[in-house]
């Protein structure tokens, strides 16, 4: 049985109402608006943020949900679930878009919490993002100079 009246409403197995709502963005927003604990860590995948990332696949785009959770201060460094942290979940789940790495790092995710060999993949993705930003900057500057 799930009790929706408590801040950390959860089933007996540890899943919170928020965990169950993922990946439904509107339901997640509703629960958060009514006091659900965004950083509750006890569900199958740890937090709602890890759950949202883990739920990403070819049929489910959870990027708006991940952005919403981060905008509401979901902690990207809470450790729990099978992949340890949300950042490790990104590189450990085959179907997860790599742009999630930048979103999580920009939200304060600590790369040192990611275990090898996943940490190396995170670093490679961040280096590639930086390179692409540099190329974009160069193209912009070159366009301005060449008119």
Image: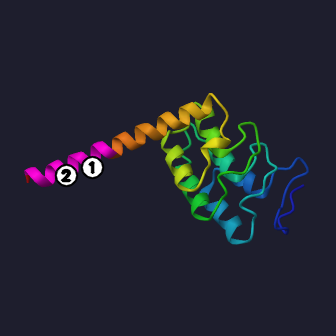
Residue 31 left/right relative to 64: right
Q: Quadrant of residue 7?
A: bottom right
Q: Secondary structure at mark 1?
A: helix
Residue 137: mark: 1
Image quarter in which the N terminus is found: bottom right
- The region drawn magenta spans 134-146
Bin the neighbour count of mark 2 within 10 Å (Cα to Cα): few under 14, some 14-19, many 20 and up: few
Percent position of residue 28, x then y: 66, 60
Residue 11 left/right relative to 93: right
Q: Is residue 71 above or below residue 105?
A: below
Q: Are marks 1 and 2 in contact (CB under 8 Å)?
A: yes
Q: Quadrant of residue 119?
A: top right
Label 2, on which residue?
Answer: 141
Bin the neighbour count of mark 1 within 10 Å (Cα to Cα): few under 14, some 14-19, many 20 and up: few
Distance of label 1 from label 2 (alpha carbons): 6 Å
Q: Is residue 67 above or below residue 135?
A: below
Q: Which residue is pictured at 21% across the width and 46% down the height?
A: 139
Q: Is residue 9 magenta?
A: no
Q: Residue furthest front?
A: 112
Image quarter in which the C terminus is found: bottom left
Q: Which residue is pictured at 34% across the width and 41% down the height?
A: 132
Residue 129: mark: none
Q: Which residue is pictured at 51% across the width and 39% down the height?
A: 97
Q: Which residue is pictured at 14% across the width and 55% down the height?
A: 144
Is residue 55 visible in the rendered structure shown here?
Answer: no
Percent position of residue 51, x then y: 69, 46
Main SS category, magenta section: helix
Residue nearest the viewer, comparing 53 with 118: 118
Q: Quadrant of residue 65?
A: bottom right
Percent position of residue 146, x then y: 8, 50
Is residue 141 visible in the rendered structure shown here?
Answer: yes
């Amino acid at each position: 049985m799930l009790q929706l009246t408590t801040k950390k409403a959860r089933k007996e197995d540890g899943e919170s109402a928020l965990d169950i709502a993922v990946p439904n963005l509107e339901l997640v927003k509703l629960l958060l608006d009514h006091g659900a604990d965004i950083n509750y860590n006890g569900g199958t995948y740890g937090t709602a943020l890890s759950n949202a990332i883990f739920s990403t696949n070819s049929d489910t785009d959870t990027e708006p949900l991940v952005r919403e959770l981060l905008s509401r201060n979901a902690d990207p460094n809470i450790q729990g679930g099978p992949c340890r942290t949300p950042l490790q979940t990104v590189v450990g789940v085959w179907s997860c878009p790599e742009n999630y790495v930048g979103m999580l790092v920009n939200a304060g995710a600590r790369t040192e919490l990611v275990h090898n060999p996943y940490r190396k993949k995170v670093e490679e993705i961040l280096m590639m993002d930086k390179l692409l930003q540099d190329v974009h900057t160069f193209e912009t500057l070159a366009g301005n100079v060449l008119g």
